[in-house]
Image: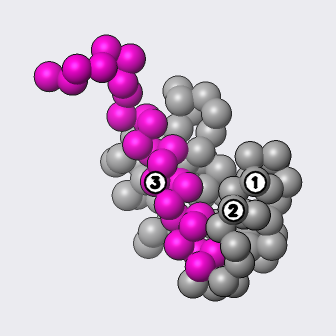
């Protein structure tokens, strides 16, 4: 049983989106992570997301501000980005 009554698994989905973004940045562009996350928080697209529209959509889906709009794990596994 969860100790935190306000905890929802959707926060893990958000974290997954940020981790995915960080991995792609490190692997593809070797940019400073701080800059990428600052840009993402400020709703400014990063170079990585501009050049990879499928990744941009996938990360945006995982990190939607509204937790009710974030996918369930099952939906993530069925997404074409992972196919």
Q: Main secondary structure of the magenta part?
A: helix
Task: Give yes or no for contact between labels 2 and 1 (Cβ–Cβ under 8 Å).
Answer: yes
The residue indicated by pointer 2 is: 34
Please identify the residue farthest to the top as the structure is shown: 5
Cα gap from disc 2 to disc 1, whole angstroms = 6 Å
Q: Residue at x 37, y 27 (%)?
A: 8
Q: Where in the figure is residue 81, as x and y percent of width and height?
A: 53, 67
Q: Which tag is nearer the camera, tag 3 or tag 1?
A: 1
Q: Which mark is residue 53?
A: none
Q: Residue at x 70, y 73 (%)?
A: 32
**Magenta-drawn stretch contains 82:** no
Q: Residue at x 38, y 17 (%)?
A: 6
State left or right for residue 77 relative to residue 67.
left
Q: Where in the figure is residue 29, as x and y percent of width and height?
A: 69, 84
Q: Which residues are magenta?
A: 1-26
Q: Which mark is residue 38?
A: 1
Tell me which corner region of the image, top left, top right, bottom left or bottom right, holds residue 52: bottom right
Q: Which tag is nearer the camera, tag 2 or tag 3?
A: 2
As rendered, which of 17 and 4 lies closer to the eye?
4
Query: From the viewer's perspective, is residue 37 above or below residue 51?
Result: above
Q: Which mark is residue 16?
A: 3
> Could you tell me if residue 1 is visible in this image?
yes
Q: Where in the figure is residue 31, as x and y percent of width and height?
A: 71, 78
Q: Quadrant of the N terminus?
A: top left
């Amino acid at each position: 049983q969860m100790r935190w009554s306000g905890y929802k698994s959707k926060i893990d989905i958000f974290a997954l989106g940020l981790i995915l973004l960080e991995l792609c940045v490190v692997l593809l562009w070797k940019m400073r992570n701080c800059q990428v996350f600052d840009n993402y928080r400020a709703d400014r697209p990063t170079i990585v997301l501009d050049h990879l529209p499928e990744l941009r959509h996938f990360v945006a889906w995982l990190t939607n501000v509204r937790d009710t709009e974030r996918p369930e794990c099952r939906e993530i596994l069925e997404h074409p980005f992972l196919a």
